[in-house]
Amino acid sequence: MTDLPLALITGASRGIGAAVAHQLSPTHRLLLGGRDEVALAKVAAELPGAEPWPVDLTDPAALAEAVRGIDELDVLVHSAGTAQLGTVAAAPSSAWRVNFEVNVLAVAELTRLLLPALRAAHGHVVVINSGGGYRARAGWGPYAASKFAARAFADSLRLEEPDLRVTSVFPGRTDTEMQRDVVSQEGGTYDSARYLRPDSVATAVVTAVTATPDAHFTEIQVRPH
């Protein structure tokens, strides 16, 4: 087990992050990132070679402490995210701030801190983005702007670090707790049958991560059928 490559997955306590962890478990050792220590421990108990990695991603000092001892990292999956919606006229600055802190700043800072370990392993960075990272919708400004920024971050990283592989995954609506919250913010009725399963998005992530060395999946879009 110790000879397996190491993957760190944020947002691993539920949803897409947990699904990615389950699909990478047979081929990777796992660090499961998130704030809910109980939920992380539950996922880790289900997966050989997995251990919780609890940290507040929006706390730079905590992040710097958490990455100590990670000298080589083969895969970094940014799955943690938030979705605070609102119109330009009504959304307060706090809505914009929280989206950018979680969806952009935490992604950028964790990647920066782990770049030496990623370079040492010629690693792979995967950013779970959103359909909102390609197309802004009315009432989605604070969230979509953060996802457009996350796409720009991944594009910049890919150009600046040619020895790494960098993949942006753009799922459509996916059956997660965050999606339930989004539908609630929209005032809609939730119907899980209309959405992607987290496992389907995880399959796209694993396809990119396990690609042959000559292949670099730079962007993957996944939509409900």
Image: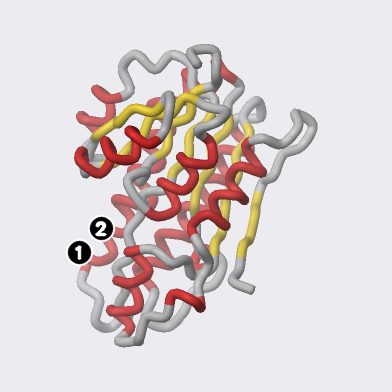
Q: Is residue 50 above or below residue 183?
A: above
Instruction: Give coordinates of residue 151: x percent, y percent.
Output: 53, 53
Task: Give the labeled residue for mark 2.
Answer: 98
The residue under the point 39% across, 17% down is 70
The residue under the point 46% across, 55% down is 149
Q: Nearer the viewer, residue 63 or 142?
A: 63
Q: Nearer the viewer, residue 207 or 199?
A: 199
Q: Is residue 3 above or below residue 154?
A: above
The single residue placed furthest to the front in the displayed view is 46
Q: Secondary structure at mark 1?
A: helix
Instruction: Give coordinates of residue 209: x percent, y percent.
Output: 62, 37
Residue 94 is marked as 1
- Label 1: few (<14), some or many (≥20) within 10 Å? few
In this orientation, does residue 88 appear? no
The residue under the point 28% across, 83% down is 89
Q: Secondary structure at mark 2?
A: helix
The residue under the point 41% across, 33% down is 47
Q: CA distance from mark 2 to mark 1?
A: 6 Å
The amino acid pointed to by label 2 is: Val
Residues under numbered marks 2 and 1 in contact, where contact means CB atoms less than 8 Å apart: yes
Instruction: Give coordinates of residue 223: x percent, y percent.
Output: 61, 68
